[in-house]
C-alpha cells in the first residue's frame, strides 16, 4: 500500500468514525483541523509511535448507573480501523447464538431467538421445559487484557491476504496491541462529578479500582468487539458439544432445556463456572434463574410469556419519567422529544403492549401537538408540515436544502 493509498484509507476511517457523532465536541475539534491531524496520525502509524493520548470517563444513569470510558477522536479512529478488518472475520468464529455487536443481529434478534427456542423445546407449550438464565458479574470490568488481545489476534490469524485489505498482518497486530493496552484508567479526565462514583458505582465495577491489565472500557468499539469473542468458546461448548439451546447477549446467557434434561444441564454449570473463572469471569449467583418455561423469562428489558412479549415494568417506568420530564421543560426541544418518544414506541409496538403505547401518547401535554402529529400507520410521532428539522432550518436562515421538503413545497 502506497502512502497515497494509506492516506486515502485514513480519510475513509475518519468519515466512518464521525458517523452519527459529528456534533460531538471532539469530532468538531478534529474536523476543524483534520488535514494536519490526519497526516500526523498517518506518519505516527508508519513510524509505530502512535499512542492514545487522552481518555475521558463519565457516568450514565439509564437504564442504570454505569461507568463509561471513551477516548479522543484519533483513538476512536484506531478502534474503527481495527474493526473494519476484524468484524467480518468474527463471523467465521462466533457462535450463531451470540447476538451482541453483530450486523443483522442485536437485542431484538436475541429475544426472537429465545422465544423460538422456548417454542421449539416445549413443542408449542405442550411439553414441560426449564429456562436457566445465567448472569455474569462485572463482565467488562473483570476482563483480562491479555486474553482479550489473544481473542482478537486469533481471529486476525484466520484472515486471508484479500481480507486484510492491503494492510500487513504485523501492522494490524501492533494496532490491536495499542488499542487493548491503552490503560484508560491511567490517564483520563472526568466529565461527571467524582461524588457520583461514590454514590452510585460499586467499586468492583469500576476500572478506577482495577490493577493494570484488568478491565474493559465500556464505550470503546474495540472492547465491544473483544468481549463478544471473550466467552465464545463457552457458548460453542454449550451448543455444539453439550447440545443445548442457548442465547447469549453480552453477559446474559439463557438456556432452554427439556424437563428430562434439567439435571444434565445443572450438572454442566460447575464446569462452566470453572471455564469462566479461568478468564476472570464469575457467575452472579444472586441473579441465577431456573424456572419452568410456562412462567416466562425476563430478558433484555422484556418479559417473555407464552405467546406474549411485554416490555418490563422498569423500562416502561423510565419511558413515563422521560415524557413527564420533557412535559415540564420550559423550552421545548421537539427533536429530542420525537427521538425519545419514538425509541420507546419502537419497543412497545413490536410487543403486545399497544395499550401502553397509547397511554404514553396520551401523556404528552397539549403544547407538543402544535408541532407534532400522530402517525397511525407507523404508530409513532411525526412532525407537522412546516416543522421538520430541514423546514425549520430553511425558514430560519432563508436557505434551500437539496431534496428537502421545503424545496419540494
Image (spheres, rainbow, N blue to C red):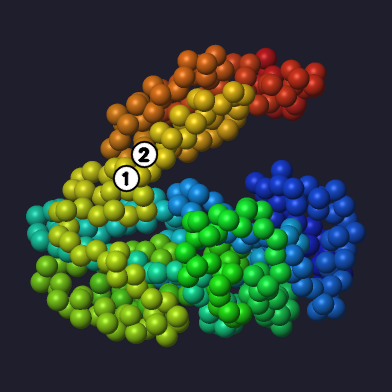
| Residue at the right extreme of this rendering | 36
Picture coordinates of residue 79 (x, y %)? 66, 65
Name the disc covering residue 316, or none: 2
> What residue is at 38 percent from the left and 76 percent from the top?
282
**Image height of 345 relative to 304, above or below:** above
Total labels drawn: 2
Figure quadrant of residue 8: bottom right
> Do tag 2 and tag 1 residues touch (Cβ < 8 Å)?
yes
Q: Residues within 10 Å of mark 2 (few under 14, many from 20)?
A: some
Is residue 129 left or right of 144 when viewed as pictured?
left
The kind of secondary structure element at disc 1 is: loop
The disc at residue 143 is none
Label 2 SS? helix
In this view, the residue in front, 122 or 197, is 197
Tell which of 38 and 191 is nearer to you.
191
Residue at 69% x, 21% y: name it. 392
Q: Is residue 388 above or below residue 278?
A: above
Left or right placement of residue 246 versus residue 409 in this view: left
Q: Report the Cα–Cα distance between label 2 and label 1.
A: 6 Å
Q: Residue at x 72, y 24 (%)?
A: 393
Residue beneath disc 1:
312
Task: Tell me the crowding category of disc 1: few under 14, some 14 to 19, or many 20 or more residues within 10 angstroms, Cα based.
Answer: some
Q: Quadrant of the N terminus?
A: bottom right
Q: Position of residue 247 (x, y in %)?
A: 33, 64
Res. 288 in view: yes
Using the image, determine if residue 20 lies above or below residue 143: above
* Residue 384 shows in the view: no
Q: Residue at x 85, y 48 (%)?
A: 32
Amino acid at each position: 500500500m502506497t502512502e497515497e493509498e494509506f492516506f486515502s484509507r485514513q480519510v475513509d476511517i475518519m468519515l466512518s468514525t464521525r458517523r452519527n457523532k459529528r456534533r460531538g465536541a471532539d469530532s468538531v475539534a478534529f474536523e476543524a483541523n483534520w488535514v494536519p491531524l490526519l497526516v500526523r496520525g498517518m506518519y505516527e502509524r508508519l513510524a509505530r509511535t502512535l499512542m492514545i493520548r487522552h481518555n475521558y470517563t463519565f457516568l450514565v444513569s439509564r437504564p442504570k448507573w454505569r461507568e463509561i470510558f471513551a477516548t479522543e477522536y484519533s483513538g476512536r479512529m484506531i478502534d474503527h480501523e481495527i474493526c473494519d478488518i476484524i468484524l467480518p472475520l468474527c463471523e467465521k468464529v462466533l457462535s450463531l447464538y451470540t447476538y451482541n455487536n453483530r450486523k443483522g443481529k442485536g437485542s431484538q434478534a436475541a429475544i426472537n431467538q429465545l422465544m423460538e427456542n422456548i417454542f421449539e423445546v416445549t413443542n408449542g407449550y405442550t411439553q414441560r421445559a426449564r429456562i436457566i438464565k445465567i448472569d455474569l458479574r462485572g463482565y467488562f470490568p473483570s476482563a483480562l487484557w491479555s486474553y482479550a488481545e489473544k481473542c482478537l489476534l486469533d481471529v486476525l490469524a484466520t484472515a486471508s491476504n484479500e481480507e486484510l485489505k492491503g494492510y500487513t498482518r504485523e501492522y494490524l497486530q501492533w494496532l490491536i496491541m495499542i488499542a487493548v493496552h491503552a490503560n484508560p484508567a491511567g490517564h483520563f479526565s472526568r466529565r461527571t462529578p467524582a461524588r457520583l462514583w461514590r454514590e452510585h458505582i460499586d467499586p468492583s465495577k469500576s476500572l478506577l479500582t482495577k490493577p493494570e491489565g484488568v478491565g474493559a472500557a465500556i464505550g470503546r468499539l474495540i472492547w465491544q468487539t473483544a468481549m463478544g469473542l471473550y466467552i465464545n468458546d463457552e457458548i460453542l461448548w454449550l451448543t455444539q458439544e453439550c447440545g443445548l439451546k442457548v442465547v447469549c447477549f453480552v453477559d446474559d446467557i439463557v438456556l432452554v432445556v427439556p424437563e428430562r434434561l434439567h439435571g444434565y444441564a445443572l450438572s454442566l454449570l460447575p464446569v462452566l463456572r470453572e471455564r469462566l473463572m479461568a478468564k476472570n469471569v464469575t457467575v452472579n449467583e444472586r441473579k441465577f434463574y431456573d424456572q419452568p418455561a410456562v412462567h416466562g423469562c425476563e430478558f433484555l428489558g422484556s418479559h417473555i410469556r407464552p405467546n406474549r412479549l411485554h416490555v418490563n415494568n422498569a423500562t416502561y417506568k423510565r419511558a413515563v419519567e422521560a415524557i413527564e420530564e420533557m412535559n415540564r421543560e420550559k423550552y421545548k426541544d421537539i427533536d429530542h422529544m420525537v427521538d425519545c418518544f419514538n425509541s420507546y414506541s419502537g419497543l412497545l409496538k413490536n410487543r403486545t403492549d399497544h395499550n401502553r403505547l397509547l397511554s404514553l401518547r396520551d401523556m404528552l401535554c397539549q403544547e407538543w401537538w402544535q408541532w407534532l402529529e400522530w402517525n397511525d400507520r407507523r404508530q409513532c410521532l411525526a412532525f407537522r408540515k412546516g416543522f421538520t428539522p430541514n423546514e425549520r432550518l430553511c425558514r430560519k436562515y432563508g436557505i434551500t436544502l437539496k431534496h428537502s421538503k421545503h424545496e419540494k413545497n
